[in-house]
Amino acid sequence: MVKYIEIKSPAKINIGLDIVSKRADGYHNLQTIFYPLYELYDIIKIERSHEFSFTSSKKELNDDNNLIVKAKNLLEKKFSRKLPVNIHLEKNIPVGAGLGGGSSNAASVLLALNDMFNLGMKKDILIRYALELGSDVPFFIKAKPAIGKSRGEILIEVKLNITKPFLIVNPGIHISTKEAFANIQPKESKIDFKAINENDLNNISLFNKLFKNDFEEYVFKTYPEISDIKKIMTDNGALFSLMSGSGSTVYGIFKDIGTAEKVRKSFPSKYLSMVLEGDF
C-alpha cells in the first residue's frame, strides 16, 4: 500500500494564445501551445491519514476553494468513497500569474490519488475529470508540449524543445481570468498551429511572425507596468517575448544565460524574476 507520495507540479507558459470565439456555454474557443517549465514547480506532499487535511506554505491558499481540495472532492464523488489524506502544498509558482500553478496542482492530485488508492483511471478518464476542474488542467496530466484547442482540453502533442534560456518576470499584479476574457474581442486565428511544420516550430526566429497573445492588448492598456516588462525584454535582446496566459507573467527567450541574467537584474527587486536554463 502506498502511504506517501511527493510530486513536483510544474508551471507552464503559453507560446501564442488566440481567443477564437465565444461559445454557447459561456466558455471561449482558443488556440495555444502549452509549454511546460519543469524547472519552476510546486511540491505537493500527500500522506494517508484517518481524515482529510490541507495545508499550504502560503496561508491564503488554505481553503476549500483551492483546486487541490476540489480535485480530491471530485474523486470522492466519482468513486463514492472517502480518500483520507493529509496534503501539503509548498508553493513556488506565483498565484494568478498565467503560469497555470493551480491547474497543475489539481492535475498532480488527480494523478497522485489515482496511484495511492489504486483507482485505475486511465489517461482519457483523468483528462475528462481534469476538465471538470478547469480548462488548463487536462494539459498537466501529461505536461508535454502540446497545441491546445477548444477550451484548451483538445491536446495535440508537438515536438518542441526550446534550448535557449527563459527569463520569467512577474510583477505581482493579479489579473482575474474572468476579467481578461470579459474584455477581449474574439477573432479567427490567422495561422493554424497544427499546420506549422516541426522545423519552423523549433525556429525561435520565426516566433514573432507566428505567435501573439490576444490578451496583451487589454492587459497592457490596463496595466502599463506589464507592457513595460515586455518592452524591456525586447529592447535588450530577447529573441521572443510574450505574456503568458491572461498575465501578469511575461517571459523572454534569450540567446544565452548571461544576457538573460543581465536583463533580469534590470527589473525591480520586488518583482519575482528567474532565469530558467531551457533544454527540458
Image: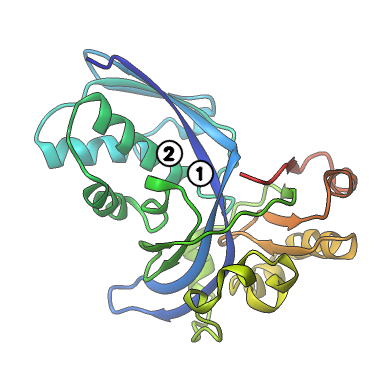
- As displayed, is residue 275 above or below residue 210? above
Which residue ends up furthest to the front in the rendered image?
Answer: 199
Numbered disc 2: secondary structure: helix
Percent of width and height locating residue 134: 36, 54
Which residue ends up furthest to the left in the rendered image?
Answer: 80
Report whether residue 132 is seen.
yes
CB within 8 Å, label 2 to label 1? yes
- As displayed, is residue 82 above or below residue 162? above
**Three-letter residue code for mark 2:** Asn
- As displayed, is residue 214 above or below residue 47? below
Q: Residues within 10 Å of mark 2 (few under 14, many from 20)?
A: many
The numbered dot on residue 263 is none
Q: In which quarter of the image is residue 70?
A: top left
Image position of 149 (left or right of 219) = left
Numbered disc 1: secondary structure: helix
Which residue does the image show at 69% across and 67% down from the upper left? 203
**Three-letter residue code for mark 1:** Gly
Q: How far apart are marks 2 and 1 (CA)?
A: 6 Å
The numbered dot on residue 101 is 1
The numbered dot on residue 105 is 2
Which residue does the image show at 57% across and 68% down from the upper left? 198
Percent of width and height locating residue 186: 49, 82
Front in this rendered view, residue 36 or 231: 36
Percent of width and height locating residue 153: 36, 61
Image position of 82 (left or right of 261) = left
Q: Considering the image in quadrants, where does the N terminus appear?
A: top left
Image position of 12 (left or right of 204) = left
